[in-house]
Image (cartoon, rainbow, N blue to C red):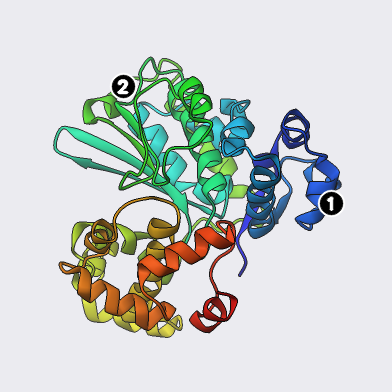
Amino acid sequence: MLARARAAMLTNYSDVARYVGLEPYVMLGRAGLHPNALSDPENWIPADRVLRLLEDSATQAHRDDFGVLLGDSRTFASIGPVSLLMKHELTLGHAIRAAIEYRRLLNELLFLDVRENGSSAIVEWGLIPGLRSAQGINLLATIAYRVIVDGAGYEWQPDCIHFRHGPPEYVATFRRVFRCPIEFDAAIDGISFQSDCLALSNETADQELAAHARRLLYLMPGVRLEDTVSERVAAIIPLLIGSGQANVEGAAACVGLPPRTLQRRLVAEGHSFSQMLNEARRDLAVRYIGNSSQSITAVAQQLGYSAQSSFTRWFISEFGMAPAKWRRLMRRRDVAHVRPGPPEAALSAA
């Protein structure tokens, strides 16, 4: 099933497009979107067309800060009905976990996770496997920052906001919007902060109203909140790869199933763990190599390879060329908004 995005993701698109010298209706048409699709923020539209619009707009306007400009006008309420729940949760940590729990009501293209490591914590975001867009990430980062830092009523700032992509030309826009240290060419897309911040109290917390909000969210039509086993595994595999525990046993522990039961459930849903692991590595390799200037050695380590040579052999078997050559090809073709096709297609275009 193709992922969808709420039309709210493109709120104020026309104004921002005109600001950077674009004709919004022309750009919408190039992306296969009708202006009426944006009339209701709760409309669901194909995610790949939204990302195509963002990338094309950034390219045509020569503004690599386009996603940040678009997200800069967001408010807490702009995330939709989930804001009613987050507004009344007890702590910042509860509000973040509510956003993770109901992320399908925010956008189907969104990957969101929070994790603690001793005294530090990370909220990581990204696009689900199969989708790739630097401007999409920039927009998600800006919305997340607006919601978690500015809009939720907590007086705090993260220690740092991280971007996998390299430093943009319009870095001043990033520095204006994100009032905390910024790291480019980072290992994650997300924010890092002291784990104590998760316990920050919410002055507007009301457990009774939070319970009402949950009941209302549960009644919303057309949205499935419960993940299948394969969807749960797909969501955690990138985290397992990063922690060096990308195996059936690690995945089973995360989803609370015995390893053999997990494997049987995946097969019943038409998947295998090894296939899903390889697909996740492909997607992460494309994202890490295409959207950042990290060394190939660093990318290999992030994908669980202790030796760059092993990673290079795997990459060649998947994409038909060495990772360094693939990176040069993608940059020369300027197709950051297009997911690469099979190896032979890339080679024939070179």
The answer to which of 225 and 9 lies nearer the viewer is: 9
Point out which mark residue 252 bears. none
* Residue behind mark 1: 34
Residue at the image point whose x is 29% and y is 26% from the top: 159
Task: Name the residue type under label 1.
Answer: His
Q: Is residue 107 left or right of residue 184?
A: right
Identity of the residue drawn at 25% across and 36% down: 121
Can you tell which mark lies on residue 200? 2
Label 1 packing within 10 angstroms: few (<14), some (14-19), many (20+):
few
- Secondary structure at badge 2 equals loop
Please state which amino acid type lies under the numbered disc 2: Leu
Question: Can you say whether 121 is above or below 205 in the image?
Answer: below
Q: Residue at x 19, y 64 (%)?
A: 245
**Residue 57, above or below 288:** above
| Residue 337 visible at all | yes
User: Image height check: is 43 above or below 131?
Assistant: above
Q: Residue at x 22, y 26 (%)?
A: 196
